[in-house]
């Protein structure tokens, strides 16, 4: 079954170029040129991934990302201005899984998309369920539950939690987590890890400032307390 992507950018030449390139790889592509149209499409279509520009007319890409996160965990890659670190951090804060700076190489875009799609694919052979106390993670369907209530995690948040839960007690430095989850060629820095861990705690922990599950070993890194 082919994958389906949504490309959102008000620069039509960029949208056209991305659409053409992704379709060459067999990915079905929808497009939108403003945030409101994008939200309408996401609400009625199941996408495998979304490419979302920060600078959009009417409502910003940040607002679109935040609105999508209220009802969907679809992977989102933000397209940000070159060198604007604040846009990158804000994108992650609002729930984006990754970001790419403009101007970009289309091969980089495709590589990032493929990396995320590989991580989010569901397999028929796996049926692993990790459970510690009232926290449960289903690896096959990529769902997380706390006290039997589903927790809506982004793709990267799930990846971080899955890695930590599979290795309870093992301390991962920020650099190790960045390499394991985002890959060797990821151009971002360890702040990306901190943002995702903070968001994880806000969603999972009763008291995020005193976490029960995702713990910090000062000077060393993060680990899962089973």
Image: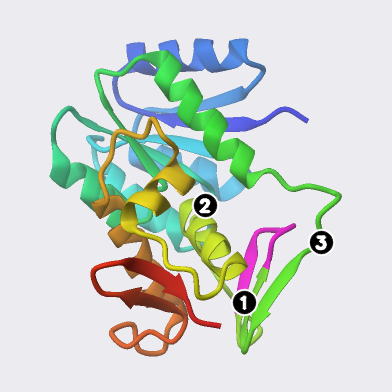
Q: Nearer the viewer, mark 3 or mark 1?
A: 3
Residue that carries the numbered disc 1 in the rendered image? 145
The magenta stretch spans residue 165: no
C-alpha distance separating marks 3 and 1:
15 Å
| Residue drawn at the location 62% of the way across and 88% of the way down | 134
Q: Tag on residue 176?
A: none
| Residue drawn at the location 60% of the way across and 44% of the way down | 119
Q: Nearer the viewer, mark 3 or mark 2?
A: 3
Instruction: Tell me if I can see residue 221 in this picture.
Output: yes
Q: Are the residues at dot 3 and dot 1 in contact (C-beta closer than 8 Å)?
A: no
Q: Nearer the viewer, residue 187 or 65?
A: 187
| The magenta segment | 138-145
Residue 52 in the image, given as x and y percentages of width and height: 37, 36
Query: Going from the N terminus, do you reach mark 3 or mark 1 first?
Result: 3
Residue 151 in the image, given as x and y percentages of width and height: 55, 72
* Relative to 204, 9 lies left or right: left
Residue furthest right as drawn = 125
Residue that carries the numbered disc 3 in the rendered image? 127
| Residue drawn at the location 47% of the way across and 52% of the way down | 156
Dot 2 crowding, Cα within 10 Å, few <14, some 14–19, many 20+: many
Query: Going from the N terminus, do you reach mark 1 or mark 2 first?
Result: 1
- Per the image, label 2 sits on a secondary structure element best described as helix
Q: Nearer the viewer, residue 69 or 123?
A: 123
* Relative to 43, 90 lies left or right: left
């Amino acid at each position: 079954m082919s994958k389906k992507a949504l490309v959102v950018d008000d620069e039509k030449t960029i949208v056209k170029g991305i659409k053409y390139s992704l379709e060459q790889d067999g990915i079905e592509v929808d497009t939108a040129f403003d945030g409101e149209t994008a939200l309408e499409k996401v609400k009625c279509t199941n996408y495998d991934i979304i490419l979302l520009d920060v600078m959009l007319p009417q409502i910003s890409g940040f607002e679109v990302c935040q609105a999508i996160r209220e009802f969907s965990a679809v992977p989102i890659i933000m397209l940000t201005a070159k060198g604007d670190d604040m846009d990158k951090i804000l994108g992650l804060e609002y729930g984006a899984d990754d970001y790419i700076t403009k101007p970009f190489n289309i091969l980089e875009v495709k590589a990032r998309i493929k990396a995320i799609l590989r991580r989010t694919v569901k397999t028929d052979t796996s049926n692993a369920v990790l459970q510690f106390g009232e926290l449960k993670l289903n690896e096959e369907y990529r769902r997380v539950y706390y006290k039997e209530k589903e927790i809506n995690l982004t793709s990267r948040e799930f990846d971080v939690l899955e890695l930590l839960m599979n290795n309870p007690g093992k301390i991962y430095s920020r650099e190790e987590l960045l390499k394991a989850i985002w890959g060797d060629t990821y151009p971002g820095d360890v702040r990306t890890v901190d943002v995702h861990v903070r968001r994880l705690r806000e969603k999972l922990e009763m008291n995020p400032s005193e976490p029960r599950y995702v713990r910090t070993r000062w000077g060393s890194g993060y680990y899962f307390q089973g």
